[in-house]
Image: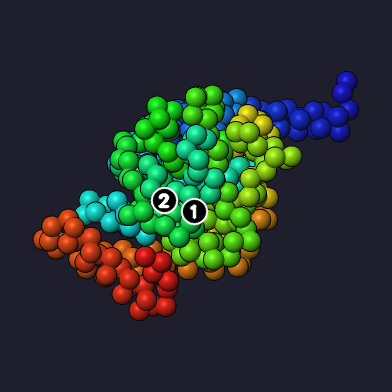
Amino acid sequence: MVPLVSRTILGIQTVLILLAVFVPLAVADGLPRTFGWTAYGTTSGGYAVSVAIGNALADDGYRLRVIPAKNDISRLTPLRAGRVHFSATGIGSYLAQEGVDEFGAKRWGPQPVRLIMMSWSDVNIGLPVVTRDSGIESTYDLVGKRVAWVVGGPALNSNMTAYLAFGNLAWDDVTRMQVSGWKASIQGMIDGTIDAAIASTNSSMLYQLEGSPHGMRFLPTPHDDVDGWARMNGRAPWILPHTATSGVGLSPDNVLEGGSYGYPILLTYAERDEQMAYDLARLLHVNFDEYKDAHSSGVGFAIERQVFDWIVPYHSGAVRYFREIGVWNALHDAHNQALIERQKVLQEAWKSIRSSNQTDDVFIDLWLATRRAALIAVGMDAVW
C-alpha cells in the first residue's frame, strides 16, 4: 500500500501535470498565428532581416508574411488600411509622425505611429553609395552628378538632402534622376544612368553593383568635419555619427566613418491592440538568438542596443514588456509621453486646416506654416 504522504504527493503531481496539459501558457495570446508586416523590396536589408525573424518565429508556430514595397508610402499604406499589422520601415516613421514631405499631402497628414523595436546594428544606414567610375570620393564631389530621387520615398530623399548639405550642396547643384523605388535607383547605377543613391551598407543588391563594370563605393562623412555635420543634422536630426564595421566590403579591419540610425524600425499605429504589441516585443526578445546571426541587421535587435529615448514614441504594449524585464525606467516614460504629446499637437494643428479647399501645393505650404506655428507655440522644435 502506498503511504498517505506519498499518495498526497502523487496526487499533487498529477494535478500539476494536468494543469500543464490543459492550461495554455500565456505566450502570445494577442498575436495572430499568421500576421504580416511590410518592408522594402526583396533585395533590401530590411526585407532580409524580416525573413530571418519570420523563420525564427516559425519554430513557435507563427507565420510572418513579409510584404515587399517600393517606398515609405507603399509601406505605410497597407498598415494604415489594416491589411498588415506592422511595418519594418526606416526614417519614414519619423516623417510620417511629423506629417512632412509626402506625408504632408491631404490624404496623409501626421500619423500616430508607435515603435515596437528597431535594429541598431554594425552597419551604416541610409548613406550615399556611388559608382566607382564616377570619380566621386566625398559628398563635396556630388556637384553636377546624377543623383537618384525616389518618388514616394521621402526618407530616402530626406537622407540624400542631408548628405548633400554635408557637402554644402543642394538639389539645384546636382542632376535629379527620378526613379520609382529604391531598387530602381540601384539598378540605375548598375545600368550606368545614375551616379549616386541612398543605401545601407548591408543592402544585398549592392553586391550586384559592386560586381558590375561601374563598381561602387560608400561616401564617408568624417566625424571631425564639424561644419559638415552641423549642416547635415540641420536637415536630418536622426542621423548620428557611427562607424560601420559590417556591409559590402566592410569589416572590423576596413571600417566606414559615417552616420546611421536604427533600421529597420518596426512600428505600428497607436490603436494597435496592446497585447499584440506586447507579444511581438516579447517574441523578438526571447527568440533573438535564433535570428541574430542570420543577417547583419539581426544583431541590432539586441535588447541592450535599443534606444528608448529616440524621436518616435513606443507602443504601450512594448513599453509594458520592457518595463517587466527591467530595461524601461521613469526617464524613458517621461520622454515617451513628451513624444506622444508632440503627436497630439501635430494632429490638432492638422485638424484645424485639413478641410481647406486649397490646391495641393498651396495646402502643403499652409500646413507647414500651421505646423511650425503650433509646435513653436508650445516650445517644441519644428525641425522643418
- The image quarter containing residue 67 is top left
- The image quarter containing residue 198 is top left
Q: Is residue 15 left or right of residue 156?
A: right
For label 2, the crowd category at 10 Å Cα-Cα, with few meaning under 14, some 14 to 19 and many 20 or more, is: some
Which residue is label 2 attached to?
143
Q: Amino acid at mark 1?
A: Tyr
Q: Amino acid at mark 2?
A: Val
Camera sees residue 123: yes
In front of the other: 219 or 312: 219
Q: Is residue 4 above or below residue 72?
A: above
Give the structural element (helix, strand or loop) at label 2.
Answer: loop
Position of the N terminus, as image quadrant, is top right
Q: Residue 201's spot in the image, x, y percent? A: 56, 39
* Separation (CA) of disc 2 from disc 1: 7 Å
Q: What residue lies at 61% left-to-right and 42% top-to-bottom?
A: 123
Q: Is residue 358 above or below residue 268?
A: below
In the image, farthest residue toward the top = 1
Which residue is label 1 attached to?
140
Camera sees residue 74: no
Q: Residue 290's spot in the image, x, y percent? A: 65, 30
Q: Residue 222's spot in the image, x, y percent? A: 61, 55
Marks 2 and 1 close (CB-CB < 8 Å): yes
- The image quarter containing residue 39 is top left
* Colouring scheme applied when the structure was drawn: rainbow
Q: Is residue 175 above or below residue 28?
A: below
Give the structural element (helix, strand or loop) at label 1.
Answer: helix
Which disc number belongs to residue 323? Answer: none
Q: What residue lies at 42% left-to-right and 73% top-to-bottom?
A: 380
